[in-house]
Amino acid sequence: MKLGIVGLGRMGGNMAERLRRDGHEVVGYSRSSGDVASLEELASVLEPPRVVWTMLPAGDPTAATFDQLMLLLEPGDTLVDGGNSNYHESIVRSKAARQKGVGFIDAGVSGGIWGLEEGYCLMVGGEEADVERLQPIFDSLAPPGGFVHCGPSGAGHFTKMVHNGVEYGMMQAFGEGYELLAASELGIDIPAALSAWRYGSVVRSWLLDLLVRALEQDPQLSEVKGWAEDSGEGRWTVNEAVRLAVPAPVISAALYARFASRKPDSPAMKVVASLRKEFGGHATKG
């Protein structure tokens, strides 16, 4: 198939390359590079019915590009949002696109920089006809078993949101396990122990593989700071858990741990330390 990809960063660029390797014709566009110089040119070189896939940061970049593309696309065309957009926004955009006769698919994409070779897990939402039309593209991007049509518009990005919330919890658990091993007085060979967990253990996973790889390159993790950003999906997941009254203590704690990582001299911990001193005479550190 022939399609346009808007956004050729770490994910979008590799996705375009994977599609080309599988015989698809990809026209790429980004602000800094690409096969065309503008969205207008992109729309002009794609034959109707067009397929345009955006891989942009959630928020204003995706919103502005969606608005521009709605002026350029025509009935019968299909737009795929592969970024980490909020599912509420995807539902609204789907309705706006369909009012113009343009199909809209919200695609949660997981795979990171490894997706070029390993493939991408795809979680898509949208109408069946639109999904079926683009199935050859999905088949080229996803490894066997790594594609799911989750449901109607918004379902793809909702599923990816929860996926990322689960990812928060898994990463936090590995981080806490590492710290506990490092704190032991027993002189545990941590890289070897974690590597052994990769074989036969119930906690073996790709995230564990990546942790072992990181330790092989930097055994003391001395080249990174203990500061972790959150990209939004964790907050959305916790908000949805509250809205739906679904207990999510692990994901919530993992999100709050990221907040705590940005405060090396936490005001809250100052209060805790002060109270411990006041009621129990416990020592404080200056």
Image (tube, rainbow, N blue to C red):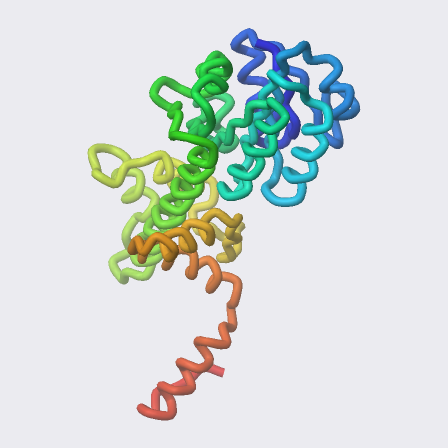
Q: Residue at x 60, y 29 (%)?
A: 99
Residue 196, image x, y percentages:
26, 38
Q: Is residue 57 left or right of residue 234?
A: right
In the rendered image, which quarter is residue 56 located in?
Answer: top right
Residue plotted at (47% across, 32% down): 153
Q: Is residue 47 visible?
A: yes
Label count reads: 0
151 over 250 or under it: above or below: above
x and y percent of residue 64 in the render?
69, 38
Of 42 and 192, nearer the camera is 42
**121 horizontally vs 71: left or right:** left
Which of the 4 quarters of the picture holds residue 65? Answer: top right
- Could you tell me if residue 178 is visible in this image? no
- The front one of 264 and 190 is 264
Query: Horizontal placement of 217 versus 212: left or right?
Result: right
In the rendered view, tell whether residue 207 sits above or below residue 280: above
Instruction: Choose between 251 and 77: the one closer to the eye.
Output: 77
Residue 139 picture location, percent across and down: 44, 15
- Measured from the top left, where is residue 216 in percent x and y? 42, 39
At x 44%, y 27%, the residue is 122
Q: Nearer the viewer, residue 171 or 53?
A: 53
Farthest residue in the front direction? 99
Looking at the rendered image, the quarter that the N terminus falls into is: top right
Identified at 37% across, 59% down, the residue is: 253
